[in-house]
Amino acid sequence: MSFDYESKISKAVQQVPPSAIRKFFDLANEMQGHVISLSIGEPDFVTPWSIREAAINSIVDGYTHYSPNSGYIDSRVAISEYINRRYGVVYDPKSEILITVGGSEGLDLAARSLINPGDEVIVVEPCFVAYKATVEFAHGVPVIVETKPENNYKLMPEELESAITDKTKYVIVGYPNNPTGAVMTLDDWAKIRDVLMRHPDIIVLSDELYCELNYLDGKPASLTQFEELRERVIMVNGFSKSYAMTGFRIGYLAGPKELIAPMFKIHQYCIMCAPSTSQLAVVEAATNADDEVEKMRDEYNHRRRIIIQGLKDAGLDCFTPYGAFYAFPCIKSTGMSSEEFCEKLLVEKHVAIVPGNAFGKCGEGFVRISYAASLEDIMEAMKLVKEFVEEHKR
């Protein structure tokens, strides 16, 4: 007699599908022969040496034990000074910064500390796959606002306004955006600020993990920079993408202490603390690695131009990304669905990318291509994509 496992699993967990990003990553790994992977959003750079050296020295110096739950105070001070340097905003390192295990833990902590069953959370799509999932895991109700290529995938104030109800608890925004590469300027955010000022009970969770990868002017722009919103904006950030520190699993939350405190409580019970070695590496990253970040950003910018030209040569329309390290071309002209396009491209040309509908229903007809890969791989992949499109012309 078989055990009824399904009845024992949370309905919230059952209704959330597995990540399509991992699906195509796994399919690529199962392929025979060489596969060019432009699927995962992971820098191909090795973490800068000074940061690795700080991590090594932390072990030599005996930092092999639990840290304080919020993180070492030196690490929180370094993060606070970094935020002030980048954004001109001051957070108290003692009470307004919580070091997390990557930015993803921050998203989860926000959902579990803010959502009561039935609360609505506005999710701006296309977006990182975890936004909607964390809301659903916490028994919240995602309310989708779809951004559009004709608006450069920016969140439009009228679209936000129309989605707000008396059940809206918070809004999740992520810019520079994964998967589109869209950015919001400070003027763009000012229009969103005006909407939020008419709804003083709504919180904003702002994912700024790609803040350093901005090819417009290189400067982060954020709702955190509006003092009038200071009491209800929570920043999710980290070092994985801009500093090539994905394996360190280190991120942070910054916000008013009244909102950070309940997140700290969950973190304290469920995680305890972020890795000590990673926290010591963050001191070096936040303090002395600006030049390294600039070098990587310049290289991404070079790759960005090449990949956009390659997509154009392949006959695929593509919104010009100005942030992160993704392109989000439209593949509707091929007559294939997003998943069909990606599956056939993988099988026939051994190039792995991600279907756009992994990032929301409005991503159907698009695919995400990461240029966090070597220039050699990008150029070869663009050649193969062009061949593939030409072979499948309708």
Image (cartoon, rainbow, N blue to C red):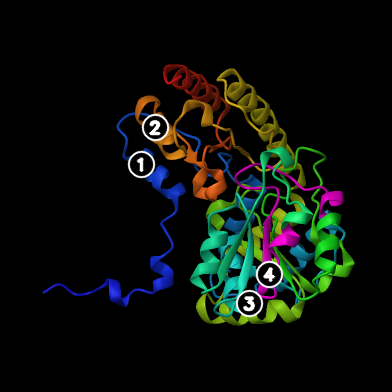
Please identify the quadrant where the C terminus is shown: top left
Whether residue 142 is situated above or below residue 175 in the rendered picture: below
Tell me, yes or no, whether the two marked residues, 1 and 2, touch with CB atoms within 8 Å. yes
Quarter of the picture holding the N terminus: bottom left
What secondary structure is found at the residue carrying circle 1? helix
Q: In this view of the protein, can residue 60 be seen by the observer?
A: no
Check if residue 171 falls in the magenta segment.
yes
Disc 1 residue type (three-letter): Leu
Q: CA distance from mark 1 to mark 2?
A: 8 Å
Marks 3 and 4 close (CB-CB < 8 Å): yes
> Mark 1, residues whose alpha carbon is within 10 Å: few (<14), some, or many (≥20)?
few
Residue for badge 1:
27
Give percent across and percent down for residue 389.
Answer: 47, 21
Quickly name the residue at label 3.
114
Which stretch is magenta? 160-189
Q: Which residue is mark 4?
A: 170
Mark 4: which amino acid?
Tyr
Q: Label 3 neighbourhood size at 10 Å, few (<14), some (14-19), many (20+)? A: some
Q: In whole angstroms, how far apart are the C-alphas of marks 3 and 1?
A: 36 Å
Give me the residue at 47% from left, 38% from top.
338
Pointer 3 or 4: first along the chain: 3
Question: Neighbour class for label 4 at 10 Å: few (<14), some, many (≥20)?
Answer: many
Which residue position is annotated with label 2? 346
Q: Tag 2, which secondary structure?
A: helix
Nearest to the observer: residue 82 or residue 155: 155
Image side of residue 345 versus residue 239, left or right: left
